Amino acid sequence: MTTDLDSMAIEMPEVSRHPNRLAFRGVLTLVDTPSDRPPAGARGHRVLLTRQAAERALPSLLGMGLDYTPSLDAHDARRKVGIITSAEIVERPATDEHGSTRIKNRESIRDDPWESVAALEVQGYLFARDFPEIVRELRAGGRRLGMSYEVADARIEDPRAPVWRLAEVTFTGAAILRRDKAAYRNTWIELQTSDVGRQTSASNSGHWPLTTGHCLSGEQMTEELTQQFVANSERLAAAAEALNQALTRLDAQQETLCEKVDRIIATIDESEAGARKEMEARIAELERANTELKAQAKPSGDPVARKTLPPLVTALLAKQGVETAGPIDLETLDKTLAALSVEQRIAVKAQMARAGWIE
């Protein structure tokens, strides 16, 4: 038995009035139709996504992110504003989004003229609370905005052809763009009007859920989310406990460090006080020694207390007729020593001063 996979969806559990989940729908691209302008990365070539390639790539589109840039003129794979949960290839009349104007791009790979086009329609959810600006833009701009797909591992039938036919692709996401910046001008995106039943059920639409052969029910999804929540809570609790222990260790280390600093400061203060006392005692000792030296150096009036002059000085004074029985007058001493050189006179006076004979 063969199955035509032209429609697929992820069945999401219904959550009434979810603040961060707002349904959207729109046309991502046209199939078997050349683009109006070269997309980014096509080296100036327009592209044509074959229906066979689109049908094979439908599973890769489910669960992919929807991104945008604030200027709505480019792709930004790191700025995800929503998720795609449903994809379907449908036949549409060859008219614009208002149903009144024929699609200008009437080129086709077929020889016969055609009156309808195959379009890849998608549905999904916008993160409305995280990105309120894109919701306001969609509500205010009507169908001024379109979409553009993002692919990888593309296989081109003839790279030299002016229009690249994509025979095989893998969808990696999509972007919201102004329609004049999109490769296909006839793509569009709009918000779903109902908050209930935004997702398409596999039982009533023929969509194939992206599962291992069966659909996930709401109860199964809720149980799985509950298990994930419990596991995440346990990991967060363990992380919080580890953080608390680390903070406790840091507090203990800080307290120990403060105690060491206090001890160092106290030791420095004690050392300074001891050094100050030792210095004061040393100064007092030096002052006493200085006083004693001054007392010892002071000449005495008692001849007995005077020291004996060196024999050379005594002989010199006796030769000059100077008596050494008592203090010697300086004027007399200068006359007596006049015959000597200056150095000799200074040496003699120094010896007499140390002996206490002159002041």
Image (spheres, rainbow, N blue to C red):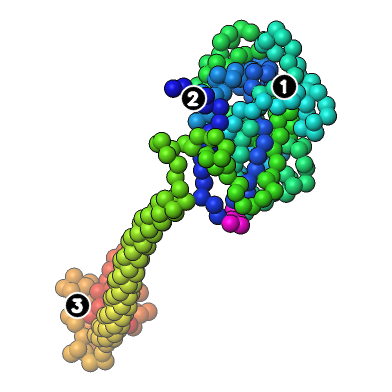
Name of the residue lying farthest toward the bottom:
302
Residue at 56% from the left image edge and 13% from the top image edge: 156
Does the CB distance between marks 1 and 3 fall below 8 Å?
A: no
Residue 12 against residue 86 in the figure, above or below: below
Q: Is mark 2 on a helix, strand or loop?
A: loop
Q: In which quarter of the image is residue 235?
A: bottom left
N-term-proximal mark, 2 vs 3: 2
Q: Mark 2 points at which residue?
A: 3
Left or right: 201 in relation to 121 = left
Cα distance between the residues tagged 2 and 3: 141 Å
Mark nearer the N terminus (2 vs 1): 2
Mark 1 secondary-structure assignment: strand
Picture coordinates of residue 294, whole percent (x, y): 29, 84
Q: In this view, does 236 lie to the left or right of 153?
A: left
Percent across and percent down for residue 324 are 22, 83
Residue that protrudes farthest toward the right in the picture: 100
The disc at residue 116 is: 1
Judge the density around disc 3: few (<14), some (14-19), many (≥20) Cα neighbours within 10 Å: some
Q: Position of residue 143 (x, y in %)?
A: 76, 38
Q: In which quarter of the image is residue 158?
A: top right
Q: Is residue 49 or residue 179 the one in the foreground? A: 49
Mark 1 or mark 3: which comes first in sequence?
1
Gap between marks 1 and 3 measured at Cα: 144 Å
Main SS category, magenta section: loop
Residue 172 visible in the displayed image: no
Image point 77% across, 32% down: which residue? 97
Amino acid type, label 2? Thr
Callout 3 amino acid:
Leu
Image-based side of 122 in relation to 353, left or right: right
Mark 1: amino acid: Ser
Instruction: Give the residues in magenta.
Output: 16-20
